[in-house]
Image: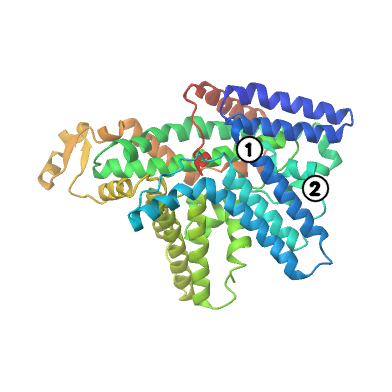
């Protein structure tokens, strides 16, 4: 079920809210948690009920392993370590089978010139997110940082519908105490106001902003055979803005929906496109994924404790794994490699004490991110090469026909005047939207900052009302969130 759908907004969410708090009001707290689990699984099954057993098996498997790790204190360290390895391999094996089987088979066919048929498995919704979340739980159980939770509490932690499909990737100690807190069992109108406010902003981000950019990005990457210089930059920037407003919009809606139930999800975005270096970007972009990669991959590999060479290798490994997690394709691997390489260069640069002016640092960082997203978005290498070639084809510049009378002298230099965005279905409106995108990411407070300062006022009510109405009126062009594909 999509957050940006009539069924979710006007049926599922209000019904779940009222029944949950009604049961709590009657002091049926276990029943309320059970209802929340059932509702969340219904929410998950709406997409494809065939994968409901998969998430149930995953939850039971990880709960049993986690409970064993917590209770097995008297056993030898080796046996607990083997139990952890079993749990991690089980999770990675499940993820690998559904997400990477065809990728593996196609590469074997290419290398060995074989013809093994592909499995064509549909990717189960949210498998990347609930897999990482449960691996973190197992590692924390091994470290004896978790308590002995009953299965119902664990099921609420894993399946809670606002964060189930595309995160944030939550930590058990962030969530479980909140569900146990008595004060959270009653309706809190301040959280309802905050929740509706941030949910409305997220809805607007997704269906009004992100889905507008999606049209030009999709045509540029998937339809156009060739792109002139301006079309190529419009294509890459459209995807850069689409991805941010799509995923941060989802996260805002998740945070808002969770607040209705008095649950605070962790912040996942903090104006990442304002970053002035790549390290800052990863502290601001998909924060919960960055935290997972750092705590459960980078640090266990040795982090920065074993010399520069080992540090650089750990960074590369961590981000290549991060790239693979996003998708089964060499373009994702290369995207992860680029970010790992950028972080290595950044560390070396800092070690020499070099600094750049603020705006130059931002320009380099933003353009690197924008170019790297080209590989992230491209379905095939050819699509990435097509867009990148266009972005640097200075012999293929097309300006709007309206400018010809004033800039006709540029024709001498090979510049032509026509519909500059024809191949991506764009118009002069495209240029306006790109300018709006830059203004929003650079000069406006982000939704997290607005939420921290939130007070119930006519101004905030008007902003939320406008965003909600504009979003609902745009639901006729419903599209899934980009991270559903990862």
Nearest to the observer: residue 319 or residue 101:
101
**In terms of sequence position, does the residue under pointer 1 or pointer 2 come before the other?**
2
Q: Position of residue 448 (x, y in %)?
A: 61, 44
Relative placement, left or right, of 425 versus 406 is right
Residue at 89% of width from left, 27% of height from top? 26
Relative placement, left or right, of 454 versus 1 is right
Quadrant hosting residue 212: top left
Residue at 51% of width from left, 58% of height from top? 321
Looking at the image, can residue 465 be seen?
yes
Q: Position of residue 372 (x, y in %)?
A: 40, 53
Q: CA distance from mark 1 to mark 2?
A: 19 Å
Q: Position of residue 351 (x, y in %)?
A: 48, 75
Asked if the residue at tag 2 contacts the one at tag 1, i.e. Cβ–Cβ closer than 8 Å, the answer is no
Q: Which mark is residue 441?
A: none
Q: Judging from the image, what secondary structure is the residue with disc 1 in?
A: helix
Looking at the image, can residue 370 be seen?
no
Q: Judging from the image, what secondary structure is the residue with disc 2 in?
A: helix
Furthest toward the right, the residue is: 27
Q: Position of residue 307 (x, y in %)?
A: 54, 78
**The N terminus: image quadrant:** top right
Instruction: Relative to 371, say whether 408 is above or below.
Output: above
Residue wearing tag 1: 254
Furthest toward the left, the residue is: 412
Nearest to the observer: residue 51 or residue 173:
51
Nearest to the observer: residue 358 or residue 421:
421
Residue at 70% of width from left, 39% of height from top? 160
Quadrant hosting residue 83: bottom right
Q: Which mark is residue 177?
A: 2
Residue at 43% of width from left, 50% of height from top? 103
């Amino acid at each position: 079920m999509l957050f940006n759908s009539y069924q979710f907004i006007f049926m599922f969410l209000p019904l779940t809210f009222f029944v949950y708090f009604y049961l709590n009001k009657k002091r049926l707290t276990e029943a309320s948690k059970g209802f929340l689990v059932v509702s969340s699984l219904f929410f998950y099954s709406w997409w494809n009920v065939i994968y409901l057993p998969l998430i149930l098996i995953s939850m039971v498997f990880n709960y049993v392993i986690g409970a064993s790790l917590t209770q097995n204190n008297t056993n030898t360290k080796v046996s607990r370590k083997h139990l952890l390895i079993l749990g991690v391999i089980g999770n990675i094996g499940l993820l690998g089978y559904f997400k990477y089987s065809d990728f593996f088979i196609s590469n074997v066919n290419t290398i060995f010139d074989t013809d093994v048929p592909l499995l064509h498995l549909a990717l189960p919704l949210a498998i990347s997110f609930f897999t990482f979340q449960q691996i973190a739980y197992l590692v924390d159980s091994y470290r004896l940082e978790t308590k002995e939770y009953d299965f119902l509490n664990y099921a609420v932690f894993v399946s809670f519908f606002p964060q189930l499909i595309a995160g944030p990737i939550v930590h058990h100690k962030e969530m479980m105490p909140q569900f146990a807190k008595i004060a959270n069992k009653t309706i809190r109108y301040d959280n309802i106001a905050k929740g509706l406010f941030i949910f409305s902003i997220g809805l607007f981000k997704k269906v009004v902003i992100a889905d507008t950019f999606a049209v030009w990005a999709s045509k540029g990457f998937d339809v156009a055979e060739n792109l002139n210089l301006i079309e190529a930059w419009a294509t890459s920037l459209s995807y850069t803005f689409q991805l941010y407003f799509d995923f941060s919009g989802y996260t805002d809606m998740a945070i808002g929906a969770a607040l209705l139930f008095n649950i605070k999800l962790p912040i996942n975005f903090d104006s990442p496109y304002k970053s002035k270096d790549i390290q800052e970007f990863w502290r601001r972009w998909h924060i919960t994924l960055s935290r997972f990669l750092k705590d459960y991959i980078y640090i266990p590999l040795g982090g920065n404790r074993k010399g520069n060479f080992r540090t650089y290798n750990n960074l590369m490994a961590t981000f290549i794994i991060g790239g693979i997690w996003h998708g089964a394709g060499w373009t994702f691997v290369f995207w992860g490699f680029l970010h790992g390489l950028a972080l290595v260069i950044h560390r070396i640069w800092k070690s020499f004490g070099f600094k750049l002016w603020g705006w130059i640092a931002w320009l380099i960082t933003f353009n690197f991110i924008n170019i790297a997203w080209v590989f992230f978005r491209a379905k095939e290498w050819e699509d990435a090469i097509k867009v990148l070639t266009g972005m640097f084809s200075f012999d293929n510049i097309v300006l709007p026909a309206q400018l010809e009378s004033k800039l006709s002298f540029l024709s001498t230099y090979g510049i032509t005047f026509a519909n500059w965005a024809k191949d991506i279905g764009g118009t002069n409106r495209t240029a306006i939207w790109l300018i709006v995108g830059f203004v929003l990411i650079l000069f406006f407070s982000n939704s997290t900052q607005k939420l921290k300062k939130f007070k119930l006022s006519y101004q905030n009510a008007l902003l939320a009302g406008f965003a909600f109405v504009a979003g609902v009126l745009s639901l006729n062009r419903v599209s899934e969130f980009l991270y559903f594909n990862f």
